[in-house]
Amino acid sequence: MSKPAKKMLHLSDLLMDRKTKVYVDTYRARKEMYEAKYPTWDERIESLSENRLEALLNSLDAKLESGERTLLHKRNQSAEHYQHICSSSQSRPCNYYKQEQVNHQEEDKKPMMICSSLLIIIIIIIISSLLIESIVQMNI
């Protein structure tokens, strides 16, 4: 009986394994640092009375609504800017920019997904900082 052939490792295989290990270690370290820097819960919330929790919730709701109004206002400004471009361009039809946008739709999906993810992360960070700030203010 013959022995099964040993697996041959090439230099590229070794480097890919090391790269993967480094990537995993870096990911874990960044995740731990992120969790330490941006905790998802604050123990001071547990000690708040029901009235203070309600006041905190109302305060956060008001700040969230204010942010939504600001975002809506910026979107409206962007739409007005687009209409201004269409009305001022005489050499091109108004739907020229829309056609160009449709042609590049596949290319634009990835950056939009990244922007959406970043926006969600930023909103979470803002809400958690507002939550901590409100708790600190209530305890003063």
Image (cartoon, rainbow, N blue to C red):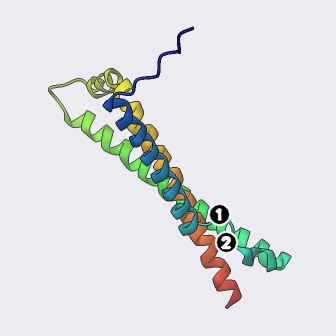
Residue 72 visible (yes or no):
no
The kind of secondary structure element at disc 1 is loop
Q: Are marks 2 and 1 in contact (CB under 8 Å)?
A: no
Q: Mark 2 points at which residue?
A: 59
Q: Is residue 21 left or right of residue 125?
A: left
Looking at marks 2 and 1 on the same chain, the residue that comes earlier in the sequence is marked by 1
Crowdedness of circle 2 by 10 Å Cα count: few (<14), some, many (20+)?
Answer: some
Task: Work out which residue is located at the far left of the displayed protein and give it.
Answer: 91
Up-down relation of residue 8 to residue 55 (above or below): above
Q: Could you tell me if residue 50 is visible in this image? A: yes
Q: In which quarter of the image is residue 139?
A: bottom right
Picture coordinates of residue 52 (x, y %)? 78, 79
Q: How many residues crowd around disc 1 within 10 Å: few (fewer than 14), some, or many (20 or more)?
A: few
Determine whether 72 is above or below 47 in the image. Answer: above
* Residue 37 percent location from the top left of the image: 53, 68
Percent of width and height locating residue 140: 67, 91
Locate the N terminus and report the quarter of the image it occupies.
top right
Specify the amino acid type for callout 1.
Thr
Label ID, residue 40: 1
Point 80% across, 80% down: residue:
47
Is residue 48 placed above or below 74 in the rendered structure?
Answer: below
Q: What residue type is labelled 2?
A: Ser
Looking at the image, which is closer to me, 69 or 115? 115
Q: Nearer the viewer, residue 59 or 10?
A: 10
Residue drawn at 60 percent across, 61 percent down: 64
Using residue 11 as the reference point, say whether residue 40 is left or right of it: right
In this rendering, which labeled residue sits more in front, label 2 or label 1? 1
